[in-house]
Amino acid sequence: MLPGITTWQHPRFFGYFPTGGALSSVLGDYVSSGLGVVGLAWQSSPALTEVEEVTTSWMRQMLGLSGAWSGVISDTASTSTLVALISARERASDYGLARGGLQAEAQPLVVYVSSQSHSSVEKAALLAGFGKAHVRSVPIDAAYAMRADALEEMVKDDILNGRKPCAIVATTGTTTTTACDPLDAIARIAEAHGLWLHVDAAMAGSAMILPECRSLWHGVERADSLIVNPHKWLGVVFDCTLYFVRDPEHLVRVMSTNPSYLQTAADGRVKNYRDWGLPLGRRFRALKLWFLIREQGVEGLQARLRRDLENAKWLEEQISITPNWRVLAPVLLQTLCVRHEPPGLDGDALDKHTLDWAARLNQSGEAYVTPAMLDGRWMVRVSIGAELTEREHVEQLWKLMQLAIER
């Protein structure tokens, strides 16, 4: 198998996003699998529920969120975004699922995203029944963040034309550039028109354990739901997504199921997490997060993330002072968007040059990066954050990038 593996844990893996592999989290996942419990209800494994309550509370506090938030652990951000949009749909339709569903609604419900939103957001909107025609792409600014003024105009236009605005999906740390949408301004619009505000902070959310980064999601307390993936930059083994809501009673009303064979004497006095998401059976995912936090501590996790931020800034400085190399977007966290632009090369020829040197670098086996489109042209994303990645590995990457354009 190993020759066919892309080694995400390698210190010179700079593709896609950082993903968890801390040994303590691996052991937590191992224990979870060995115990083999299934979280159908509190009574089917009380510790599964109660450790999850503890760890989601720890993470809420680490992220600087208030006690107004309640959390649940799910598999991926894609699933949690779907849950958020289903919840938004039901609030906007006054629980239409109990009647004729979306097919009985007099006005089509509209969801607002940006062109920089993760592909899973549109997928979730389609699966939740909104329809592609009612998923609006809001224009972005020069920093690739959603424009609140354009959003407001689109919401007003939909109201005037007989459509019903339902939800906004804003992003803290977009996939391509880690742009951060202006949550405070977006929340003002959501509140004024009664829209559900969901915040996708899948990768960048881990940075919010650093107080100095929290300005990037200023206004998050005004959202309705929020996702953070500890299985990305924080170091938890895949899969482990935190889904936070400010109104768990609404979530439970939409997602609850209570057949006779699951009813117990403890119901009403404990949490049954089956009513907090899509699946009935649930793994003991909290263990791998609990193990990681207990072993590394908050300060240990913070130190590792600060190391990655410093390494990203170092690489940005090196690229910025080197002729014909460009950093194409603000480096807010640990991701750089890079292009080598030889004099006289542009358009399709520049795209070919970019894809060629990135392919040579990846095929060398010495490092891994991911090409992506930005403003209609190819560039290369460098995502720093593997647990073993130190400054020396970033320095090696920079040398390899310069060698790759010369071959």
Image (cartoon, rainbow, N blue to C red):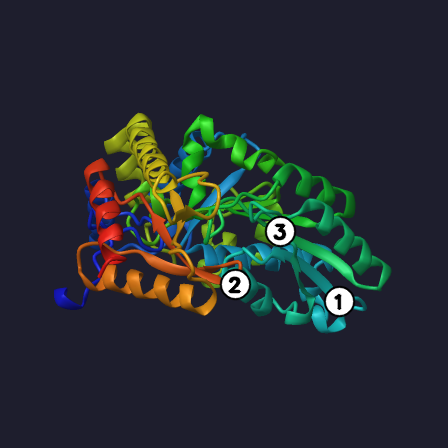
Residue 352 in the image: state x and y as whole percent: 37, 68
Q: Residue furthest bottom?
A: 103
Q: Is residue 94 above or below residue 291?
A: below
Residue of label 3: 140
Q: CA distance from mark 1 to mark 3?
A: 25 Å
Q: Which mark is residue 376?
A: 2
Q: Looking at the image, is mark 2 or mark 1 earlier in the sequence? A: 1
Q: Which mark is residue 222?
A: none
In the image: residue 313, left or right of residue 4: right
Q: Amino acid at mark 3?
A: Ile
Quadrant position of residue 256 = bottom right
Residue 84 in the image: state x and y as whole percent: 57, 54
Question: SS of the residue at dot 3?
Answer: loop
Residue ID at (34%, 58%) = 370
Q: CA distance from mark 3 to mark 2?
A: 14 Å
Mark 2–mark 1 contact, CB under 8 Å? Answer: no
Taking depth in this image into account, of 97 and 200 the one nearest to the observer is: 200
Residue 375 in the image: state x and y as whole percent: 53, 58
Name the front one of labels 2 and 1.
2
Question: SS of the residue at dot 2?
Answer: loop
Mark 1–mark 3 contact, CB under 8 Å? Answer: no
Residue of label 1: 108
Q: CA distance from mark 2 to mark 1?
A: 31 Å
